[in-house]
């Protein structure tokens, strides 16, 4: 009986993950792009990227990619619309965060390590695999990615 209940509920498993990941990345993207929630805004994010990566790419390009991927990916994930693509955008920003920004600090977040961005990356990868499933616009509109 418990197995039957769990099987019926499994399509709803991505829902709490979609909601939380969507909220978190909406805020992070809005910080980078618009300066909302105490963030640096686009100009500050651009300058930060230029300083961090030593001019590897123009900071404006990196700010647009990171902020846009987080903000628009979050909206897609939250709504469950093109969920896998939205999660992909978020995952791309987290790969950079883990390996470029946090890797040298080690695992632990108390040392600016990669534990938190790695966790967010795995959450995004989970949604890339599962898709939005039940209660998503993907399921309502019958959008399939195989």
Image: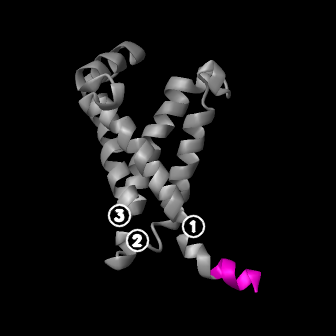
Determine the image quadrant of residue 19.
Answer: bottom left
Tell me the residue at 24%/31% (across/down): 34
Check the image and report above or below for 78 versus 39: below
> Mark 2 = which residue?
145
Majority secondary structure of the magenta segment? helix
Image vertical order of residue 6 relative to residue 88, above or below: below
* 46 falls in the magenta region: no
Compute the Cα span from label 2 to label 3.
9 Å
- Sequence order check, earlier mark of 1 and 3: 1
Q: Residue at x 54, y 30 (%)?
A: 99
**SS class, disc 1:** loop
Question: Does residue 116 appear left or right of residue 92 in this picture?
Answer: right
SS for tag 2? Answer: loop
Up/down of 142 relative to 49, above or below: below
Q: Do the residues bearing badges 2 and 3 touch, measured as CB atoms within 8 Å? A: no
The residue tagged 1 is 13
Q: Position of residue 32 (x, y in %)?
A: 32, 30
What stretch of residues is rendered in magenta? 1-7
Going from N to C along the chain, the mark reached first, 2 or 3, is: 3
Dot 2 alpha-carbon crowd within 10 angstroms: few under 14, some 14 to 19, many 20 or more: few
How far apart are labels 1 and 2 at the CA level? 18 Å
Q: Residue at x 47, y 66 (%)?
A: 131
Where is mark 3, residue-wise? 82
């Amino acid at each position: 009986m418990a197995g039957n209940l769990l099987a019926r509920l499994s399509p709803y498993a991505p829902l709490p993950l979609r909601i939380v990941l969507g909220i978190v990345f909406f805020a992070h993207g809005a910080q980078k792009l618009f300066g909302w929630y105490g963030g640096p805004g686009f100009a500050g994010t651009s300058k930060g990227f230029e300083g961090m990566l030593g001019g590897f790419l123009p900071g404006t390009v990196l700010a647009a990619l990171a902020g846009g991927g987080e903000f628009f990916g979050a909206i897609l994930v939250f709504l469950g619309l093109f969920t896998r693509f939205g999660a992909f955008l978020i995952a791309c920003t987290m790969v950079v965060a883990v390996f470029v920004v946090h890797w040298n600090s080690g695992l632990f977040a108390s040392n600016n390590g990669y534990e938190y961005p790695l966790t967010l990356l795995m959450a995004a990868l989970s949604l890339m695999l599962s898709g939005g499933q039940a209660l998503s616009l993907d399921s309502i509109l019958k959008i399939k990615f195989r």
